[in-house]
Image (cartoon, rainbow, N blue to C red):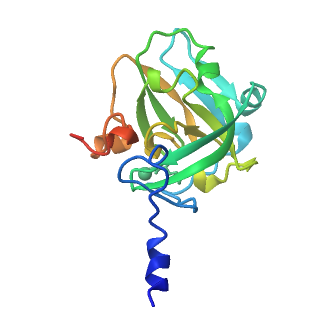
Amino acid sequence: MNIISRGFRGRRQDGPPDRVPPGQYLTDDFPVLSAGPTPHTLLDEWTFDIRGGAAPMRFTWEELQALPSEEITKDIHCVTKWSKLDTVWRGISVDTLLDAVEHDAGYAVAFCDGGYTTNLPIEDLTDGKAWVAYEYDGEPLEAEHGGPARLLVPHLYFWKSAKWVRGLALRDEDEPGFWEQNGYHLRGDPWLEQRYWGD
Ligand SMILES: Nc1nc2c(c(=O)[nH]1)N[C@H]1C(S)=C(S)[C@@H](COP(=O)(O)O)O[C@H]1N2
Ligand SMILES: [Mo]
């Protein structure tokens, strides 16, 4: 009888090739990957800052909540090889946030409570490709998954989706963030398998 081994093999599903990038497998769980302890910031002390534009911009939690939000259904892909299809979020488009700032930057570094950073070209943050998400599956985003708010950049590997995000620092040059200084690819396109330096 090989029912059991078949059952185990079932965890490593291939999934539809147009949805699951090369080298990835599907999971129904939502694994937690954090490089340090989970910070807990009170909402009335929480702000989202955009630095490096013509003038600094700051949104309080209340101001952020007053902006038009969207429901976002996207597949996500972690560089540790799990992918999860049709995850449902609510958040504010980064387009909406950057519209409030005069700038001509080509890049940004997202910064977070706890000190995590990740770098992104502005092109990967705009035109409906990135959000500051504060709900997952119809509930406030859990702290372990980045609540109160995280960046959601689903077309890149999930390390770009900075948890506990507190703002964006606009830059003229691409400046490696936490994982990008420690061996991860500068951009991280899962369809090109841009996992590590040199990929
Ligand atoms: N602030 C912060 N954001 C982070 C991380 C982190 O360690 N700290 N880990 C990244 C990595 S490597 C991944 S795969 C995803 C994991 O998100 P999850 O724990 O909600 O699955 O968050 C990303 N964002
Ligand atoms: Mo990751």
Residue drawn at x 31%, y 40% is 194
Residue located at (73% from left, 30% from top): 69
In this view of the protein, can residue 52 be seen by the observer?
yes
x then y, percent, for residue 68: 75, 25
Q: Is residue 102 left or right of residue 70?
A: left
Depth check: 15 or 191 in front?
15
Q: Relative to residue 145, is residue 53 depicted above or below?
A: above
Relative to residue 191, is residue 163 drawn left or right? right
Residue 88, above or below 96:
below
Q: Is residue 146 visible?
A: no
Residue placed most toward the observer, 64 or 29: 29
In x, y percent, where is residue 164?
57, 44
Quadrant of the frame with the N terminus: bottom left
Q: Give the x, y percent position of residue 126.
A: 53, 22
Q: Residue at x 44, y 38 (%)?
A: 156
The front one of 11 and 182 is: 11
In the rendered image, the residue lying farthest to the bottom is: 1
Say which of 171 and 190 sits in front.
Answer: 190
- What percent of the width, then of the height, locates residue 88? 67, 45
